[in-house]
């Protein structure tokens, strides 16, 4: 018994025709350096000191 799962009512199945071909040259990856973060100590009103980054969440919270 020969069963075919892609049977198409005894009609020929047309195959897609490739008309154009695109050739892409290899590209070198671009390396972007990480930004330099400036750290500093933030002293809270209760005396606790936090080591934070300038412009980071701790800095923004204290400035708020």
Image: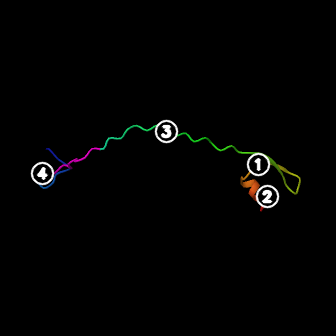
Q: Residue at x 11, y 53 (%)?
A: 11
The mark lying in front, picked from 3 and 1, is: 3
Sequence-wise, which precedes: disc 2 or disc 3?
A: 3
Residue that numbered label 1 is attached to: 52
Sequence-wise, which precedes: disc 4 or disc 1?
A: 4
Sequence-wise, which precedes: disc 3 or disc 1?
A: 3
* Badge 4 density bin: few <14, some 14–19, many ≥20, Cα 10 Å: few
Q: In front: 24, or 13?
A: 24
Mark 4–mark 2 contact, CB under 8 Å?
no
Mark 3–mark 1 contact, CB under 8 Å?
no
Sequence-wise, which precedes: disc 2 or disc 1?
A: 1
Residue that numbered label 4 is attached to: 12
Classify mark 2: helix, strand or loop. Answer: helix
Instruction: Indicate which disc residue 62 carries.
Output: 2
User: Residue 55: horizontal and vertical position, in percent?
Assistant: 72, 53
User: Residue 9: horizontal and vertical position, in percent?
Assistant: 13, 56
Residue 57 picture quarter: bottom right
User: Residue 45: horizontal and vertical position, in percent?
Assistant: 87, 57
Q: Quadrant for the C terminus, please.
A: bottom right
Mark 2–mark 1 contact, CB under 8 Å?
yes
The span from disc 3 to disc 1 (Cα, nearest Å) is 32 Å
């Amino acid at each position: 018994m020969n069963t075919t799962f892609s049977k198409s009512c005894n009609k020929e199945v047309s195959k897609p025709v490739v008309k154009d071909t695109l050739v892409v040259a290899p590209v070198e990856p671009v390396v972007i350096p990480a930004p330099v973060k400036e750290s500093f100590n933030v002293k809270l009103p209760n005396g606790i000191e936090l080591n934070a980054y300038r412009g980071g969440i701790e800095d923004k919270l204290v400035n708020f």
